[in-house]
Image (spheres, rainbow, N blue to C red):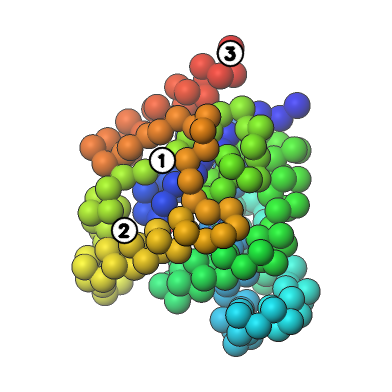
Amino acid sequence: MSFNIAIDGPAGAGKSTAAKLAAKELGFIYVDTGAMYRTIALYLLRSGTDIEEEAALQAALEDIDVRISYEQGVQHMILNGEDVSGLIRTPEVSDMASRSSARPAVRKKLLDLQRQLAAREDVLMDGRDIGTAILPKADLKIFLTASVAERARRRFLEMKEKGEECSEEEIRREIEERDYRDMHREISPLVQAEDAVLLDTSDMTLEQVVERITALAKEKMHA
Ligand code: CDP
């Protein structure tokens, strides 16, 4: 039986950075489900699909083959045979991922891929609905969050480091918009699972967050 850790939380809470490091320390595979939604979003943008049109969306989804591959422990997203990992972190893709992930057909497309991975491997999977919908029986569930101001500040620093022009205020607005959409959609909204441990990282360093996640995991594994 594989050991599954579900980490959910809003945009910019630091899930992926912390989850990646914690997975490495635990010897687990890190699965970034946001990257899967982003990969589908990239296809939808490229093809100019009107995602509100059910038939058009269905047709587009049928043409999409999403795969995940690991090179030296790093997750790569493969879209119809093309490695698109470097193309899915733009604001346009973020926006399309947030909008298209509210469509049931898009979520359905990724459900099996996510569950199959978790059934096969010890995974630390991060997203919005992992503990509530994808892996309701996960061995450990964590809801990772931080204040909007802190999340905007972190995202801003991250973008600046990459040399990208942006305003902190604009990022804050974007985060608030995405939070609202993720939390209010009908299907698999972002909510804390009843049995999830709440981790507010507003006043925590990255090291502290990683330490807490690995400590919680070790506690459960040895229980
Ligand atoms: O990294 P960041 O927090 O900005 O976002 P992400 O985790 O890469 O996810 C991008 C978008 O995909 C989110 O805004 C969600 O709307 C959606 N998503 C989702 O609906 N369910 C998941 N399990 C993961 C992401």
Q: Which residue is disc 2 drawn over? A: 155
Residue found at x 49% / y 51%: 190
Residue found at x 22% / y 65%: 168
**Front residue (pair 162, 108):** 108
Q: Amino acid at mark 3?
A: His
**Which image quadrant for residue 167?**
bottom left
Does 74 sit left or right of 122 as displayed?
left
Numbered disc in front, either 3 or 1: 1
Q: Please tell me the numbered disc located at residue 144.
A: 1
Q: Position of residue 155 (x, y in %)?
A: 31, 58
Query: If you read the primary sequence from the N terminus, does the residue marked by circle 2 or circle 1 appear first?
Result: 1
Q: Is mark 1 within 8 Å of ligand 1?
A: no
Q: Amino acid at mark 2?
A: Arg
**Helix, strand or loop at disc 2?**
helix
Q: Is mark 3 within 8 Å of ligand 1?
A: no
Q: Is residue 153 above or below residue 96?
A: above
**Helix, strand or loop at disc 1?**
strand
- Image quadrant holding the C terminus, namely top right
Query: If you read the primary sequence from the N terminus, does the residue marked by circle 3 or circle 2 appear first?
Result: 2
**Front residue (pair 129, 40):** 129
Q: Amino acid at mark 1?
A: Leu
Neighbor class of circle 1 (other Cα within 10 Å; few <14, some 14-19, many 20+) is: many
Q: Is mark 2 within 8 Å of ligand 1?
A: yes
Q: Position of residue 38 (x, y in %)?
A: 55, 66
Whole-angstrom CA distance, mark 3 to mark 2, is: 35 Å
Q: Which residue is disc 3 drawn over? A: 222
Does 94 sit left or right of 108 as displayed?
left
